[in-house]
Image (tube, rainbow, N blue to C red):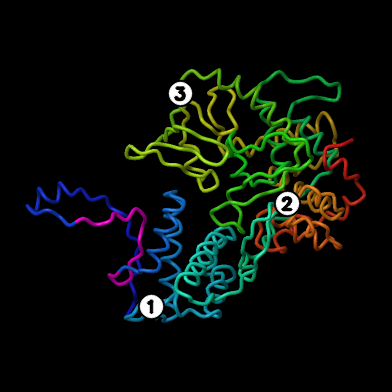
Amino acid sequence: MVSSVRVIRPVAVDPEVIERVLGVTPHEVEHVDAPSIMVDGEFHVAASRWLLRKYRLRPVEATIKSHAARLALYIAWLRNDCGLAGNDQWYADVFVVSEEQVRRYYRLRQFDPKTRVSSSAWQAQLSTIKQFHEFLRDTYRVPLPFHIESFLNPVGMRVTSATELRPRMRDGSRGTPITPEFSDLLIQGALRIDGQLRQTDSLTVERDAAFISLGLATGMRLATLASITAYELPPLGAGPLTTIRVPDFITKGDAGGDALVFAHRLVPVHQYIHGARDELIGMMRAPYSPIDAIELVGADSDAWETTVDGKVRRFTWVETDMMTRRRLVLPDGTSPLLWYGGYKAKPISYAQAATITAMARDWTRAHLEPNFPASFRTHDLRHTYATHLVVCIYKQAVAQYIHESAADAYRPGRIADAVSIAKLSLGHASEASTNLYIQHAPKFLDISIDEFLGGK
Protein backbone atom coordinates (compact mmCIF):
# COMPACT_ATOMS: atom_id res chain seq x y z
CA MET A 1 0.00 0.00 0.00
CA VAL A 2 1.33 3.40 -1.00
CA SER A 3 1.23 5.98 1.79
CA SER A 4 -0.33 9.36 1.13
CA VAL A 5 1.76 12.17 2.60
CA ARG A 6 0.33 15.68 2.38
CA VAL A 7 1.03 19.14 3.76
CA ILE A 8 -2.05 20.63 5.42
CA ARG A 9 -2.09 24.39 5.65
CA PRO A 10 -3.62 26.15 8.69
CA VAL A 11 -7.19 27.41 8.31
CA ALA A 12 -8.65 30.16 10.44
CA VAL A 13 -11.89 29.17 12.19
CA ASP A 14 -14.59 31.67 13.08
CA PRO A 15 -16.63 30.29 16.04
CA GLU A 16 -19.49 32.70 15.32
CA VAL A 17 -19.91 31.36 11.79
CA ILE A 18 -19.95 27.76 13.05
CA GLU A 19 -22.55 28.58 15.70
CA ARG A 20 -24.70 30.42 13.20
CA VAL A 21 -24.60 27.58 10.67
CA LEU A 22 -24.86 24.59 13.04
CA GLY A 23 -26.84 26.19 15.82
CA VAL A 24 -24.48 24.97 18.54
CA THR A 25 -21.61 26.60 20.38
CA PRO A 26 -18.31 25.05 19.22
CA HIS A 27 -15.71 23.82 21.68
CA GLU A 28 -12.71 26.06 22.17
CA VAL A 29 -9.66 24.66 20.39
CA GLU A 30 -6.16 26.03 19.97
CA HIS A 31 -5.55 27.46 16.52
CA VAL A 32 -2.52 25.87 14.86
CA ASP A 33 -0.78 28.67 12.98
CA ALA A 34 1.69 26.50 11.04
CA PRO A 35 1.31 23.82 8.36
CA SER A 36 1.03 20.19 9.45
CA ILE A 37 1.88 16.91 7.74
CA MET A 38 -0.77 14.24 7.32
CA VAL A 39 0.10 10.60 6.56
CA ASP A 40 -2.68 8.29 5.38
CA GLY A 41 -5.33 10.55 6.84
CA GLU A 42 -3.69 11.01 10.24
CA PHE A 43 -1.49 13.82 11.47
CA HIS A 44 2.20 12.98 11.74
CA VAL A 45 2.58 14.19 15.31
CA ALA A 46 6.35 14.63 15.44
CA ALA A 47 6.63 16.38 12.07
CA SER A 48 3.66 18.66 12.77
CA ARG A 49 4.96 19.48 16.22
CA TRP A 50 8.36 20.44 14.83
CA LEU A 51 6.82 22.67 12.15
CA LEU A 52 4.68 24.42 14.77
CA ARG A 53 7.70 24.91 17.01
CA LYS A 54 9.81 26.28 14.14
CA TYR A 55 7.08 28.70 13.13
CA ARG A 56 6.50 30.01 16.63
CA LEU A 57 10.21 30.54 17.17
CA ARG A 58 10.61 32.34 13.84
CA PRO A 59 7.25 33.03 12.17
CA VAL A 60 8.28 33.48 8.54
CA GLU A 61 5.53 31.94 6.43
CA ALA A 62 7.58 31.26 3.29
CA THR A 63 10.30 29.52 5.29
CA ILE A 64 7.96 27.21 7.17
CA LYS A 65 6.10 26.29 3.95
CA SER A 66 9.41 25.27 2.39
CA HIS A 67 10.35 23.20 5.44
CA ALA A 68 6.95 21.45 5.34
CA ALA A 69 7.22 20.60 1.63
CA ARG A 70 10.75 19.21 1.99
CA LEU A 71 9.89 17.21 5.10
CA ALA A 72 6.80 15.70 3.46
CA LEU A 73 8.92 14.65 0.48
CA TYR A 74 11.42 12.98 2.80
CA ILE A 75 8.76 11.12 4.83
CA ALA A 76 7.01 9.93 1.64
CA TRP A 77 10.30 8.52 0.33
CA LEU A 78 11.01 6.70 3.60
CA ARG A 79 7.56 5.12 3.59
CA ASN A 80 7.07 4.32 -0.08
CA ASP A 81 10.62 3.70 -1.31
CA CYS A 82 12.23 2.28 1.82
CA GLY A 83 9.16 0.46 3.10
CA LEU A 84 9.28 2.18 6.50
CA ALA A 85 5.50 2.40 6.84
CA GLY A 86 3.44 1.05 9.72
CA ASN A 87 0.20 1.41 11.63
CA ASP A 88 2.02 2.98 14.57
CA GLN A 89 3.81 6.13 13.43
CA TRP A 90 6.21 5.93 16.39
CA TYR A 91 7.74 2.83 14.76
CA ALA A 92 7.80 4.06 11.19
CA ASP A 93 9.61 6.43 8.77
CA VAL A 94 11.79 8.98 10.62
CA PHE A 95 11.80 7.01 13.86
CA VAL A 96 13.42 3.90 12.34
CA VAL A 97 15.41 5.24 9.37
CA SER A 98 18.98 3.95 9.22
CA GLU A 99 22.20 5.71 8.31
CA GLU A 100 22.44 3.72 5.08
CA GLN A 101 18.93 4.79 4.05
CA VAL A 102 19.77 8.45 4.64
CA ARG A 103 22.92 8.00 2.57
CA ARG A 104 20.87 6.38 -0.16
CA TYR A 105 18.53 9.39 -0.18
CA TYR A 106 21.58 11.65 -0.43
CA ARG A 107 22.99 9.69 -3.38
CA LEU A 108 19.64 9.81 -5.19
CA ARG A 109 19.35 13.55 -4.73
CA GLN A 110 22.93 14.41 -5.60
CA PHE A 111 24.37 11.78 -7.94
CA ASP A 112 21.61 9.77 -9.63
CA PRO A 113 21.03 11.34 -13.11
CA LYS A 114 17.29 10.59 -12.94
CA THR A 115 16.53 11.99 -9.47
CA ARG A 116 19.30 14.41 -8.56
CA VAL A 117 18.59 18.04 -7.76
CA SER A 118 20.81 21.10 -7.77
CA SER A 119 23.36 21.58 -5.01
CA SER A 120 21.38 24.50 -3.61
CA ALA A 121 18.15 22.45 -3.57
CA TRP A 122 19.89 19.62 -1.69
CA GLN A 123 21.45 22.16 0.64
CA ALA A 124 17.94 23.30 1.62
CA GLN A 125 16.69 19.70 1.91
CA LEU A 126 19.64 18.77 4.12
CA SER A 127 18.99 21.75 6.37
CA THR A 128 15.41 20.55 6.96
CA ILE A 129 16.42 16.91 7.53
CA LYS A 130 19.25 17.80 9.91
CA GLN A 131 17.19 20.18 12.02
CA PHE A 132 14.24 17.78 12.20
CA HIS A 133 16.37 14.81 13.25
CA GLU A 134 18.06 16.96 15.89
CA PHE A 135 14.55 17.75 17.17
CA LEU A 136 13.71 14.02 17.27
CA ARG A 137 16.92 13.34 19.19
CA ASP A 138 16.30 16.08 21.74
CA THR A 139 12.54 15.49 22.14
CA TYR A 140 12.06 11.73 21.67
CA ARG A 141 15.60 10.43 22.28
CA VAL A 142 15.78 9.05 18.73
CA PRO A 143 19.45 8.56 17.66
CA LEU A 144 20.66 10.62 14.71
CA PRO A 145 20.93 8.49 11.53
CA PHE A 146 23.97 10.46 10.36
CA HIS A 147 27.09 12.04 11.81
CA ILE A 148 27.22 15.75 12.65
CA GLU A 149 30.16 17.98 13.50
CA SER A 150 30.01 20.79 16.03
CA PHE A 151 32.22 23.87 15.85
CA LEU A 152 32.44 27.57 16.77
CA ASN A 153 31.65 30.26 14.22
CA PRO A 154 33.65 33.54 14.13
CA VAL A 155 31.69 35.09 17.03
CA GLY A 156 31.99 32.05 19.29
CA MET A 157 28.55 30.53 18.69
CA ARG A 158 28.41 26.73 18.50
CA VAL A 159 26.79 25.36 15.32
CA THR A 160 26.41 21.91 13.74
CA SER A 161 26.80 20.52 10.24
CA ALA A 162 26.16 17.13 8.58
CA THR A 163 29.38 17.34 6.59
CA GLU A 164 29.22 13.79 5.15
CA LEU A 165 25.98 14.73 3.37
CA ARG A 166 27.28 17.97 1.91
CA PRO A 167 26.17 19.09 -1.57
CA ARG A 168 28.22 17.72 -4.43
CA MET A 169 31.05 19.80 -5.80
CA ARG A 170 30.10 22.15 -8.62
CA ASP A 171 32.39 22.85 -11.55
CA GLY A 172 30.76 26.26 -11.90
CA SER A 173 32.31 27.39 -8.62
CA ARG A 174 35.74 27.77 -10.17
CA GLY A 175 36.18 31.49 -10.64
CA THR A 176 38.64 34.34 -11.07
CA PRO A 177 39.76 36.09 -7.88
CA ILE A 178 41.61 39.38 -8.29
CA THR A 179 44.31 41.07 -6.21
CA PRO A 180 43.60 43.97 -3.83
CA GLU A 181 45.11 46.30 -6.44
CA PHE A 182 42.76 45.06 -9.16
CA SER A 183 39.87 45.23 -6.68
CA ASP A 184 40.54 48.92 -6.18
CA LEU A 185 40.71 49.42 -9.95
CA LEU A 186 37.35 47.68 -10.36
CA ILE A 187 35.76 50.05 -7.85
CA GLN A 188 37.30 52.96 -9.73
CA GLY A 189 35.85 51.51 -12.90
CA ALA A 190 32.43 51.28 -11.23
CA LEU A 191 32.72 54.99 -10.44
CA ARG A 192 33.52 55.54 -14.15
CA ILE A 193 36.79 57.32 -13.33
CA ASP A 194 39.38 57.07 -16.07
CA GLY A 195 43.17 57.24 -15.97
CA GLN A 196 43.09 61.05 -16.02
CA LEU A 197 40.72 61.07 -13.01
CA ARG A 198 37.77 62.26 -15.08
CA GLN A 199 34.43 60.90 -13.88
CA THR A 200 31.07 60.32 -15.55
CA ASP A 201 28.38 62.45 -13.94
CA SER A 202 25.75 59.96 -12.70
CA LEU A 203 24.22 59.10 -9.32
CA THR A 204 24.20 55.40 -10.13
CA VAL A 205 28.00 55.14 -10.32
CA GLU A 206 28.23 55.58 -6.54
CA ARG A 207 25.68 52.81 -6.19
CA ASP A 208 27.69 50.55 -8.51
CA ALA A 209 30.90 51.18 -6.57
CA ALA A 210 29.13 50.46 -3.28
CA PHE A 211 27.59 47.27 -4.69
CA ILE A 212 30.96 45.91 -5.83
CA SER A 213 32.69 47.02 -2.65
CA LEU A 214 30.11 45.25 -0.46
CA GLY A 215 30.59 42.08 -2.52
CA LEU A 216 34.33 42.27 -1.96
CA ALA A 217 33.80 43.01 1.74
CA THR A 218 31.41 40.17 2.54
CA GLY A 219 31.53 37.51 -0.19
CA MET A 220 27.72 37.43 -0.42
CA ARG A 221 26.05 35.51 -3.22
CA LEU A 222 24.32 37.62 -5.88
CA ALA A 223 20.74 37.04 -4.65
CA THR A 224 21.67 37.96 -1.09
CA LEU A 225 23.76 40.94 -2.15
CA ALA A 226 20.96 42.28 -4.35
CA SER A 227 18.37 41.94 -1.57
CA ILE A 228 20.30 43.22 1.44
CA THR A 229 18.75 46.11 3.37
CA ALA A 230 20.36 49.27 4.71
CA TYR A 231 19.53 48.11 8.24
CA GLU A 232 21.76 45.02 8.01
CA LEU A 233 24.92 46.89 7.06
CA PRO A 234 27.57 46.86 9.83
CA PRO A 235 28.62 50.29 11.13
CA LEU A 236 32.05 51.62 10.36
CA GLY A 237 34.51 50.80 13.13
CA ALA A 238 38.11 51.33 14.08
CA GLY A 239 39.37 47.83 13.23
CA PRO A 240 40.06 46.28 9.81
CA LEU A 241 37.54 43.45 10.33
CA THR A 242 33.95 43.26 11.50
CA THR A 243 31.06 40.82 10.98
CA ILE A 244 27.74 40.75 9.17
CA ARG A 245 24.79 38.39 9.55
CA VAL A 246 24.14 36.52 6.28
CA PRO A 247 20.79 34.72 5.72
CA ASP A 248 21.68 31.92 3.29
CA PHE A 249 24.40 30.01 5.13
CA ILE A 250 24.36 26.20 5.04
CA THR A 251 25.88 25.79 8.47
CA LYS A 252 23.35 27.99 10.19
CA GLY A 253 20.20 26.78 8.47
CA ASP A 254 17.46 29.35 8.63
CA ALA A 255 19.07 31.30 11.43
CA GLY A 256 21.73 32.76 9.15
CA GLY A 257 25.44 32.95 9.89
CA ASP A 258 28.13 35.48 10.75
CA ALA A 259 30.69 36.33 8.08
CA LEU A 260 33.90 38.25 8.58
CA VAL A 261 33.91 41.56 6.74
CA PHE A 262 36.81 43.60 5.35
CA ALA A 263 35.80 46.85 7.04
CA HIS A 264 37.57 49.28 4.68
CA ARG A 265 35.34 48.02 1.85
CA LEU A 266 32.30 49.32 3.74
CA VAL A 267 33.34 52.95 3.34
CA PRO A 268 31.93 53.37 -0.21
CA VAL A 269 28.72 51.66 0.94
CA HIS A 270 28.14 54.10 3.80
CA GLN A 271 29.02 57.00 1.52
CA TYR A 272 26.39 55.79 -0.95
CA ILE A 273 23.74 55.39 1.77
CA HIS A 274 24.18 58.96 2.99
CA GLY A 275 24.78 60.43 -0.44
CA ALA A 276 23.57 59.10 -3.78
CA ARG A 277 20.95 56.79 -2.25
CA ASP A 278 19.31 59.69 -0.43
CA GLU A 279 19.32 61.66 -3.68
CA LEU A 280 17.78 58.77 -5.62
CA ILE A 281 15.05 58.44 -3.00
CA GLY A 282 14.48 62.19 -3.23
CA MET A 283 13.75 61.76 -6.94
CA MET A 284 10.76 59.52 -6.24
CA ARG A 285 7.56 60.79 -7.87
CA ALA A 286 5.33 58.23 -6.17
CA PRO A 287 5.60 55.86 -3.19
CA TYR A 288 7.11 52.42 -3.72
CA SER A 289 4.15 50.10 -4.41
CA PRO A 290 5.10 46.42 -4.84
CA ILE A 291 2.44 43.73 -5.27
CA ASP A 292 1.16 42.54 -1.86
CA ALA A 293 3.11 45.24 -0.06
CA ILE A 294 4.01 44.73 3.60
CA GLU A 295 4.03 47.97 5.58
CA LEU A 296 6.74 48.22 8.21
CA VAL A 297 6.01 49.87 11.53
CA GLY A 298 9.58 49.54 12.76
CA ALA A 299 12.98 48.06 11.94
CA ASP A 300 16.48 47.75 13.37
CA SER A 301 19.66 45.85 12.54
CA ASP A 302 18.21 42.51 13.72
CA ALA A 303 14.56 42.52 12.66
CA TRP A 304 11.58 44.34 11.20
CA GLU A 305 8.03 44.76 12.46
CA THR A 306 4.62 44.88 10.81
CA THR A 307 1.01 44.71 11.96
CA VAL A 308 -0.76 41.35 11.52
CA ASP A 309 -4.40 40.99 12.64
CA GLY A 310 -4.10 44.11 14.76
CA LYS A 311 -0.94 42.95 16.54
CA VAL A 312 2.65 44.02 15.92
CA ARG A 313 4.74 41.03 14.80
CA ARG A 314 8.53 40.96 14.67
CA PHE A 315 10.53 39.04 12.04
CA THR A 316 14.30 38.65 11.85
CA TRP A 317 16.12 39.79 8.72
CA VAL A 318 18.09 36.55 8.38
CA GLU A 319 14.88 34.53 8.05
CA THR A 320 13.20 36.90 5.61
CA ASP A 321 13.39 35.41 2.12
CA MET A 322 14.33 37.48 -0.91
CA MET A 323 10.80 37.78 -2.32
CA THR A 324 9.40 39.01 1.00
CA ARG A 325 12.16 41.61 1.27
CA ARG A 326 11.00 43.14 -2.02
CA ARG A 327 7.46 43.52 -0.64
CA LEU A 328 8.53 45.62 2.34
CA VAL A 329 7.62 49.30 2.40
CA LEU A 330 8.71 51.82 5.04
CA PRO A 331 6.30 54.41 6.51
CA ASP A 332 7.74 57.12 4.23
CA GLY A 333 6.83 55.08 1.12
CA THR A 334 10.36 53.86 0.36
CA SER A 335 11.93 50.40 0.30
CA PRO A 336 14.43 49.30 2.97
CA LEU A 337 16.50 47.55 0.27
CA LEU A 338 19.92 49.06 -0.24
CA TRP A 339 20.18 49.38 -4.01
CA TYR A 340 18.01 51.87 -5.91
CA GLY A 341 17.63 52.41 -9.66
CA GLY A 342 18.41 55.59 -11.52
CA TYR A 343 15.11 56.98 -12.82
CA LYS A 344 12.15 55.33 -11.08
CA ALA A 345 14.02 55.32 -7.74
CA LYS A 346 12.91 51.80 -6.81
CA PRO A 347 15.02 48.75 -5.86
CA ILE A 348 17.04 47.27 -8.68
CA SER A 349 16.10 43.88 -10.13
CA TYR A 350 18.31 40.78 -10.03
CA ALA A 351 19.05 41.30 -13.72
CA GLN A 352 20.22 44.86 -13.07
CA ALA A 353 22.36 43.68 -10.16
CA ALA A 354 24.03 41.09 -12.36
CA THR A 355 25.09 43.71 -14.91
CA ILE A 356 26.70 46.14 -12.43
CA THR A 357 29.94 44.19 -12.20
CA ALA A 358 30.07 43.59 -15.96
CA MET A 359 29.75 47.31 -16.70
CA ALA A 360 32.47 48.18 -14.16
CA ARG A 361 34.71 45.44 -15.57
CA ASP A 362 34.34 46.71 -19.14
CA TRP A 363 35.10 50.29 -18.07
CA THR A 364 38.16 49.11 -16.14
CA ARG A 365 39.49 47.21 -19.15
CA ALA A 366 38.83 50.10 -21.54
CA HIS A 367 40.12 53.01 -19.42
CA LEU A 368 42.31 51.70 -16.61
CA GLU A 369 43.84 48.23 -17.06
CA PRO A 370 43.54 46.27 -20.31
CA ASN A 371 44.79 43.13 -18.53
CA PHE A 372 41.86 43.07 -16.13
CA PRO A 373 40.12 39.65 -16.53
CA ALA A 374 37.61 39.85 -19.37
CA SER A 375 35.46 37.09 -17.87
CA PHE A 376 35.13 38.63 -14.40
CA ARG A 377 31.54 38.50 -13.08
CA THR A 378 29.63 39.28 -9.89
CA HIS A 379 30.22 35.79 -8.46
CA ASP A 380 33.96 36.42 -8.76
CA LEU A 381 33.58 39.05 -6.02
CA ARG A 382 32.83 36.06 -3.77
CA HIS A 383 35.88 34.18 -5.08
CA THR A 384 38.01 37.26 -4.41
CA TYR A 385 36.66 37.61 -0.88
CA ALA A 386 37.32 33.92 -0.17
CA THR A 387 40.88 34.07 -1.46
CA HIS A 388 41.73 37.26 0.44
CA LEU A 389 40.25 35.85 3.64
CA VAL A 390 42.15 32.55 3.40
CA VAL A 391 45.44 34.41 2.89
CA CYS A 392 44.76 36.69 5.86
CA ILE A 393 43.86 33.73 8.08
CA TYR A 394 46.89 31.75 6.93
CA LYS A 395 49.17 34.69 7.77
CA GLN A 396 47.47 34.83 11.19
CA ALA A 397 46.32 38.39 10.67
CA VAL A 398 42.73 37.65 11.75
CA ALA A 399 43.07 36.01 15.19
CA GLN A 400 43.32 39.27 17.14
CA TYR A 401 39.93 40.40 15.83
CA ILE A 402 38.04 37.16 16.64
CA HIS A 403 36.01 36.28 19.72
CA GLU A 404 38.49 35.07 22.34
CA SER A 405 36.87 31.63 22.58
CA ALA A 406 37.69 30.97 18.92
CA ALA A 407 40.89 32.98 18.49
CA ASP A 408 43.25 30.00 18.77
CA ALA A 409 41.54 28.35 15.80
CA TYR A 410 42.47 31.38 13.69
CA ARG A 411 46.19 30.65 14.03
CA PRO A 412 46.54 27.86 11.44
CA GLY A 413 49.77 26.10 10.64
CA ARG A 414 48.81 25.07 7.10
CA ILE A 415 46.82 26.69 4.32
CA ALA A 416 44.41 23.72 4.48
CA ASP A 417 43.63 24.76 8.06
CA ALA A 418 42.96 28.31 6.86
CA VAL A 419 40.49 26.92 4.32
CA SER A 420 38.70 25.03 7.09
CA ILE A 421 38.29 28.27 9.02
CA ALA A 422 37.29 30.40 6.02
CA LYS A 423 34.41 28.07 5.18
CA LEU A 424 32.53 29.46 8.20
CA SER A 425 32.47 32.96 6.73
CA LEU A 426 31.45 31.61 3.33
CA GLY A 427 28.62 29.58 4.82
CA HIS A 428 29.88 26.29 3.41
CA ALA A 429 29.18 22.94 5.04
CA SER A 430 32.59 21.53 4.11
CA GLU A 431 36.09 22.42 2.99
CA ALA A 432 35.38 20.77 -0.38
CA SER A 433 33.13 23.66 -1.39
CA THR A 434 35.56 26.27 -0.10
CA ASN A 435 38.47 24.64 -1.94
CA LEU A 436 36.79 25.48 -5.23
CA TYR A 437 36.94 29.16 -4.29
CA ILE A 438 40.57 29.42 -3.23
CA GLN A 439 42.51 27.45 -5.84
CA HIS A 440 44.53 30.56 -6.66
CA ALA A 441 45.33 31.50 -3.05
CA PRO A 442 49.02 30.43 -3.21
CA LYS A 443 49.57 33.10 -5.90
CA PHE A 444 48.44 35.77 -3.41
CA LEU A 445 50.74 34.81 -0.52
CA ASP A 446 53.45 37.35 -1.44
CA ILE A 447 51.03 40.28 -1.21
CA SER A 448 51.33 42.40 1.93
CA ILE A 449 48.64 41.89 4.58
CA ASP A 450 48.18 45.67 4.69
CA GLU A 451 46.84 45.59 1.14
CA PHE A 452 44.17 43.02 2.04
CA LEU A 453 43.13 44.97 5.13
CA GLY A 454 43.00 48.40 3.50
CA GLY A 455 46.45 49.70 4.35
CA LYS A 456 48.96 50.96 1.80
Q: Position of residue 157 (x, y in %)?
A: 64, 56
Image coords of residue 29 (percent x, y): 24, 57
Question: How many other residues sit within 10 Å of disc 2, few (<14), some (14-19) or many (≥20)?
Answer: some
| Front of the two marks 3 and 1 | 1
Query: Taking 107 as reference, is 57 above or below it?
Result: above
Task: Give the residue pinned by disc 1.
Answer: 90
In this view, 87 is above or below 417: below
**Dot 3 crowding, Cα within 10 Å, few <14, some 14–19, many 20+:** some
Q: Quadrant of the N terminus?
A: bottom left
The span shown in magenta is: 28-42
Query: Residue 270: horizontal and vertical position, in percent?
Result: 68, 29
Question: What's under tag 3, amino acid-wise?
Answer: Pro
In 3D space, how far apart are the residues under numbered discs 3 and 2 (Cα atoms)? 43 Å
Looking at the image, tell me whether mark 2 or mark 1 is earlier in sequence order. Answer: 1
Residue 160 x, y percent position in the rendering: 61, 64
Q: Which residue is mark 3?
A: 287
| Figure check: 164 above or below 368 | below
Q: Is residue 409 above or below residue 200?
A: below
Residue 242 vs residue 22: left or right?
Answer: right
